Image (tube, grey):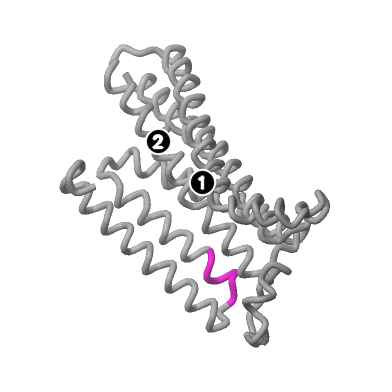
Amino acid sequence: MLLVAKKDGIRNLLGLGFNFIAIFMLITMMAWGIPLLILLPIFTFIILALSIYMSSDDGDTTNIAFKTSLIVVFVLGIFTIFVQYIGQFQGFSAENADELENLSLAVGLNFSNVAISMMAISMLGAVAEAAMAIVANLFEVIEQDEAMTLNQFQAQRTMITQQILGTAINTLFFGVLGSSVGLVLWFVRLDYSLAQIINSKLLMADVASMLLGMLGILFSIILAGHFVEKKFNLDLTNK
């Protein structure tokens, strides 16, 4: 990052460091027993702000990306609570039994809240990245053609949306697939049935996080593109 982006790379590295500190503080405060409904909105705002505003100094781009990310994460945050209620991904699984045999499970934590936090945090990066990517690309297209009409912009928006959507979802899918290879091999070698695999907390928690991330990417791209188009149309009207 330092070799390629130079000063921007330093800013991005600082943002990464601050986000690490923020997540560490979130985990610590959860361990102290502070309610999730207080912690998660605060730290979601902080993490998104650091991720977006530390990655670019273009005010229009970052403002639209940040607004989009907040809306998408808020909506999917509510959906995450519903997913956790249906899936019951909290706690430990049978595959963890050997590691936990000599340990006490009376740690005084609501593991349902831990599962919700895990799914919410895992989608923040995907949402922020997708929003920044579509907004930056659309503004670049507008800057390159000052005589662009609204119809031309909409055609460009559709093309860029398709490209970013496919790439971002593939990246998320293969990331989750790669992290779950060992678990899948475990299932195969121990002859797990399909029902056992579907009811595995470890695997289904990763799948749920992946699907939420994919929805976040989809909604971010659509909503961010709408905001940029609205601003572009307003600028055309003012001309």
Residue pointed to by mark 1: 175
Q: Where does residue 77 sit, x and y in percent of width and height?
A: 61, 55
> Is 165 on the left-hand or right-hand side of 12?
right
Magenta region, residue range = 35-40
The 10 Å Cα crowd at callout 2, few under 14, some 14 to 19, many 20 or more, is: many
- In the image, what residue occupies the spot 53% across and 41% down? 174
Question: In which quarter of the view is residue 98 placed?
Answer: bottom right
Vertical arrangement, residue 128 with respect to residue 117, above or below = above
Amino acid of disc 2:
Ala
Vertical arrangement, residue 22 with respect to residue 32, above or below = above
Query: Disc 1 or 2, which lies upstream in sequence?
Result: 2
Q: Where does residue 219 sit, x and y in percent of width and height?
A: 57, 38
Q: Main secondary structure of the magenta part?
A: helix
Q: Where does residue 54 sit, x and y in percent of width and height?
A: 29, 52
Residue 6 has which mark? none
- In the image, what residue occupies the spot 38% across and 65% down? 20
As helix, strand or loop, the secondary structure at mark 2 comes to helix
User: Alpha-carbon distance for marks 1 and 2?
Assistant: 19 Å
Q: Where does residue 158 sit, x and y in percent of width and height?
A: 50, 20
User: Between 173 and 112, which is closer to the camera in this rendering?
Assistant: 173
The 10 Å Cα crowd at callout 1, few under 14, some 14 to 19, many 20 or more, is: few
As helix, strand or loop, the secondary structure at mark 1 comes to helix
| Contact between labelled residues 2 and 1, with CB atoms less than 8 Å apart | no
Q: Is residue 104 visible?
A: yes
Q: Residue furthest front?
A: 189
Which image quadrant: the C terminus?
A: top left
Vertical arrangement, residue 133 with respect to residue 78, above or below = above
Amino acid of disc 1:
Gly
User: Between 17 and 227, which is closer to the camera in this rendering?
Assistant: 17
Q: Is residue 78 visible?
A: no
Residue pointed to by mark 2: 133
